[in-house]
Amino acid sequence: MAERSRSCVSALLRVVTIWGTLLLAFPSVSASLILKEPHERYVSFLKGTDRARHGCRVGNRCRDHRGIARAGGGICVNYDTNREGAEETAAVIREAAGDVVLLEADVCSEAAVEAMFAEAKRAFGTPTILVNSAGIDALGKPIAEMSLAEWEAALRTNLTGPFLCARAFVRGLAQANAAGGKIVNIGSVHEEIPRAAASEYCASKGGLRNLTRCLSLELAPQKINVNGIAPGMILTPMNQADLDDPEKLKKDEETIPLRRGGQPEEVARLALYLASSDADYVTGASYVIDGGPMQNQGQGVVKRTLAGIRREKGTAQNQKSALLVDDLRRMVAPLGASLLDRRDRALILLGFAAALRRSELVALRVTDVRMEEEGLVLTLRRSKTNQEGRLEKIAVAYGSEPTTCPVRALRAWLAAAGLVDGPIFVGLTPQGGLRDAPLGDRMVAHVVKRRCKAVGIDPELVAGHSLRRGFETRPPGRRNPIG
């Protein structure tokens, strides 16, 4: 009996994914059969629309379920105008599951929805599970050719309908003083993936996604869980073109990582889980069931986002150790009066004191330095976070210790090298002469590593960025980090 009852619910939910509106009532289903709660009533309300617009032949797709068993209660099939399709569906269900009631209602109509819920309550009691399932697909029209009526039809069916049903559902629970309930909104992967010539459809599904999230917060105090399902290509009459054309189906399935379209019962099983007590701690989620295409889209979004972050903020540095004041004292203590030693001392101390990036250090020119009575002012013309060339001023004060003072070190280097123009930090020839070209930014890391190694600091733990990181570890409020 357990398997037969479980099959009944799954099969009926499969009908829902094809048809539109279905009301299930199970007043005496035992815990082990379906939802693991004894003698609880489960009523699943699924809103519908006129599937005649899509050429839907529901009954043809329900004939595989003649073996489903009756679990008790009644079933309502809602339809808009396609009564013939609804009766065909009802006949298949009636053969296996018992009593079926057909309810005509347009879920885009406030009055019709209220009347439908009132009729359902008279038949089976207050519904505790609502599944908003039906929708209309995109017309394939660009916005310039779309009429207002066509736009509004998609929004009313795909978004206003779920709103009206959810409102009636919540009001019904409140009036009955019912403890908790479940709402499952059937959306689409196009709640996230935009599609050209489908603005009305994508906008309505994106709205449904946010409606789901908002209601999950609003209704949580009443213990009403609200979740969504975002199907991709499911082989229902909404994809009739694929069902009728094997070549088109094959081509479309090649775009899906799992290389196949989804089956309605796969969506049904997910809906069944979200409607059950197993999902009592799940709310506000949207479950993608698409065979993988969303992951391809997600990778593209992530790549573009990360590229934008890199452009704006720069590439994150490897996590190297910060150089602190005591480390700098050790590094510069052995340095003498040679051009190489004077250059390296100025580079290390100025980079630390001004918290400069490697690229900023090597881009400095003599004309970017203005000596002041209390120190110096640097002008940065461009940096990773300033690609527009806005001038940035950085003041560096004299240090109290002459051997580690960045201002004195820079003055000494400029005087010894005789630099009055051009780049400040230039390379040296093997004979100790000056090169015309500035140091490359990687040479900053080379200088730092070489000077660390000379005094027993592991060079593998540091890099050019260690100068800047060392400054950033200082307590706030200290403009002179060394003296």
Image (cartoon, rainbow, N blue to C red):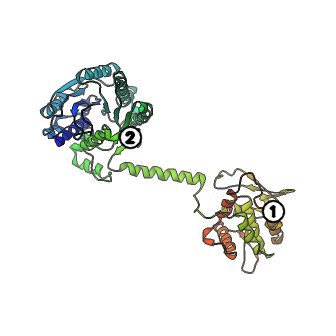
Q: Nearer the viewer, residue 229 or 124?
A: 124
Give the numbered dot on residue 281: 2
Query: What residue sits 17% from the left and 30% below the top?
Result: 90
Assess disc 2: are there few (<14), some (14-19) or many (≥20) residues with their C-alpha within 10 Å of its C-alpha: few
Q: Amino acid at mark 1?
A: Val
Query: What residue sits 49% from the left and 51% below the top?
Result: 304
Assess disc 1: are there few (<14), some (14-19) or many (≥20) residues with their C-alpha within 10 Å of its C-alpha: many
Please say if 244 is above or below 453: above
In this picture, residue 12 sits left or right of residue 135: left
Question: Disc 1 designates what residue?
Answer: 407
Q: Nearer the viewer, residue 122 or 161?
A: 122
**Residue 138 shows in the view:** no
Quarter of the image where the N terminus is located: top left
CA separation in Å, label 2 and label 1 = 62 Å
First in sequence: mark 2 vs mark 1? 2
Quarter of the image where the C terminus is located: bottom right
Query: Residue 435, percent across and down?
Result: 73, 73
